[in-house]
Amino acid sequence: MVPARTTLSSRDAGLKRSYIGNDSGAEACRVCDPIHAADMKLPLLVCLLFGSLVAAPIPVLLDTDIGTDIDDAYALVQVLQSPELELLGVTTVSGDAVARARLAAKLLTVAGRGEVPVYAGISTATQYMKQVEWAAGFISPALRESGGVEFLRQQINARPGELTLIAVGELTNVAALLETEPGIAKKIKAIALMGGSIRRGYAPGSKPEPEWNIKSAAKAAQVVFASGVPLLVAPLDSTADLKLTPEWKVRIFARGSPTNDALAALDFVWRHTNTWKGENPTLFDNLAVALVATPGVAPLTPLHLVVEADGTTREIADRPPNAQVVLTSEPAKFLEYFTARLAR
Ligand SMILES: [Ca+2]
């Protein structure tokens, strides 16, 4: 990885501090567990001091196109398996957003988190989304078949400046949110998104090319990149080589939990029906989740990015940064991080 250090704005610096606090918090939790504390013969006072340093989980909203590529299903479980994060709700976008919401709600229920609100957002033209059949007919009091953008708006207004939005589909819902209320951008702590292609494309060594999430709704992406909300961006540069090959999946599926059994079923459906003949999941969206849960998981480079009408993302050298971007990654290191979380 290129250890590019970032020049953080005061707002970004606050974001960074809170993330670092949560990293240390996980360790502090273990230390202050009564059983382990007794083993370690730590005085109670030390534990109390550590306890005071434990940061609250980071409240997040997940906006997803779960049901087409498989990385979204893994990303939803990844959020649940990240103790640094508090999932306030899920919204869905593109294709049949209602069917996607049904899928997210069922997966959450299998995971024992059926109380998490799931709202369908904006639907668009029909897409391949065979996984949604796994959740056909699913109903839940937490599932709403419309109102995704309004749900996001209400959540953000209820806690201005506190919520991070993790956006791992096209940016249609997010742009609609930003356009629904003047000034709401300033109330969003950050948007972590998977999208773009800055210095390479899908294949190693290839030239940049319009990336799916951006090109599917380029105007929406333009709204987001011009919004002034601090952006954490995971483009193809750092995600396209994150291949979840069978040896990693064996570790995840051998966990034997109902959640991972569900992932195995969804992975199988995806593997044998996806229209682009993908064999191994690419963990595109999962780096965006990790950037929020675990700052430092990948190096950030401050860039000013603009979105062209065709979905090309271009860096402009002489403008102030509008995004912290991950340009490189170490696949084996990330896959170990990811697999350990899902297999725990
Ligand atoms: Ca996605």
Image: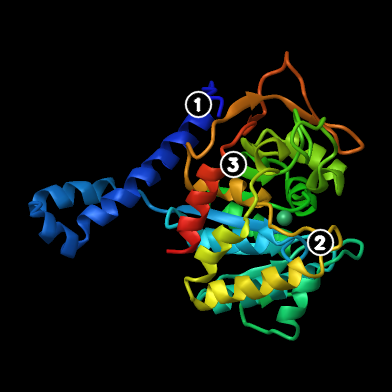
Q: Amino acid at mark 1?
A: Ser
Q: Is residue 127 left or right of residue 259?
A: right
Query: Ligand 1, what quadrant?
Result: bottom right
Query: In the displayed image of the protein, which residue is found farthest to the front?
Result: 247
Circle 3/circle 2 CB separation < 8 Å: no
Q: Amino acid at mark 3?
A: Ala
The answer to whether residue 167 is visible is: no
The secondary element bearing badge 1 is classed as helix
Residue position marked by numbered label 2 in the rendering:
122
Q: Quadrant of residue 151?
A: bottom right
User: Which numbered circle lies on residue 190?
Assistant: 3
What crowding class fits label 3: few (fewer than 14 Cα within 10 Å), some (14-19), or many (20 or more)? many
C-alpha separation, residue under disc 3 versus residue under disc 2: 21 Å
Where 196 falls versus 317 (above or below)? below
Residue position marked by numbered label 1 in the rendering:
10
The answer to whether residue 82 is visible is: yes
Q: Is residue 248 left or right of residue 277?
A: left
Residue at image point 42% right, 64% down: 344
Q: Is residue 246 left or right of residue 178?
A: left
Residue 10: percent from left, percent from top: 50, 26
Residue 252: percent from left, percent from top: 52, 65
